[in-house]
Image (cartoon, grey):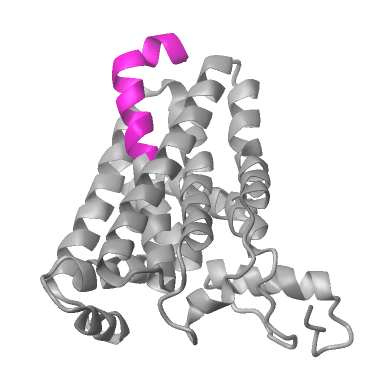
Amino acid sequence: MKKAANPGTSPRFARFLSIFTLISRIPVNRRFDVDFSRADFWIPALSPLVSFAALAGFGAGMALTGSIFLAAISSIALQYFLFNLFHFDGLVDSADALLPVASRERRLEILKDPRLGTYGFFCGALVLSARIGAMRVLAEEGLLFTFLAASLLAAPAAGRAAAALIALKLAPVRQNGLGSLMKGFSASRIAMGSLVALVPALTFSWLAGSWPLAIVIAASAVLATILATFIVGRAYTKALGGFTGDSLGAAIEIGELLMLVISGIVLKFLGSMVI
């Protein structure tokens, strides 16, 4: 285990800060050696920070405008500014690299190219539009925004659990990239971190007086995680034979979106049984 470069920073806190800088855009004074050990636990476990940003953005948007549509945009803006922009970049880069017909070498070149292509633009716009649509359904159909709040609390956990599973199941494509630092991942630690991440969503559902909602949220999160892991893992395995840092961002974005979409579908057809 690496020792922190700053004597005042404990190894555990240095590890926590290392993972925090990986999942967020909030600046941290890096006076320590980067340590991604136990990232398998912390990547999903830190998800509630993202959830609270999404909820704060939605609440502020509703308070200022009274519009669900604008509140959804406000939620996305705050969450992405603080946490998800790096992950969104991984999603659009993945779309540019994997969707066109190209050689493996060309795909790797595209992943390094900072320019946005047609495939990335289309995929990014589609994901953001679908996210807004899913949030509107959850807010309009769910009693007093209960279903939306529970779903927003759980969505980051689903996406980040999928990212951790990608790093567990696939080998890194580059030996000097971000993926190469994701070593020694354990399924049990990913599961534990994911359970920690779901505590706020399940607690909220229970306090709202709906244990069926807690069951639906947990099941939706598991399904979204599995689907996102399969989609991104399959695409990267087929195209590159392994994973990159961009694949982790893509898994996070797709996992979060799937969680919201699945919750919206359940609410549409089984809402009266859940709330």
7 or 232, which lies in front?
232
Image-based side of 129 in relation to 182, left or right: left
Image-based side of 252 in relation to 160, left or right: left
Q: Position of residue 36 (x, y in %)?
A: 65, 72
Q: Position of residue 66 (x, y in %)?
A: 36, 39
- Number of numbered labels in the structure image: 0
Q: Which residues are magenta?
A: 259-275
State whether residue 208 is above or below residue 86.
above
Could you tell me which residue is drawn at 40 percent across and 69 percent down?
A: 243
Q: Does any portion of residue 202 appear in the rendered image?
A: yes
The quarter of the picture where the N terminus appears is bottom right
Could you tell me which residue is drawn at 27 percent across and 63 percent down?
A: 238
State whether residue 98 is above or below residue 216.
below
Q: Position of residue 181 (x, y in %)?
A: 57, 77
240 or 88, which lies in front?
240
Q: Quadrant of residue 19?
A: bottom right
1 or 240, which lies in front?
240
State whether residue 4 is above or below residue 72.
below
Q: Does any portion of residue 26 appear in the rendered image?
A: no
Could you tell me which residue is drawn at 31 percent across and 51 percent down?
A: 231
Q: Main secondary structure of the magenta part?
A: helix
Whether the magenta-drawn stretch holds residue 264 is answered as yes
112 or 260, which lies in front?
112
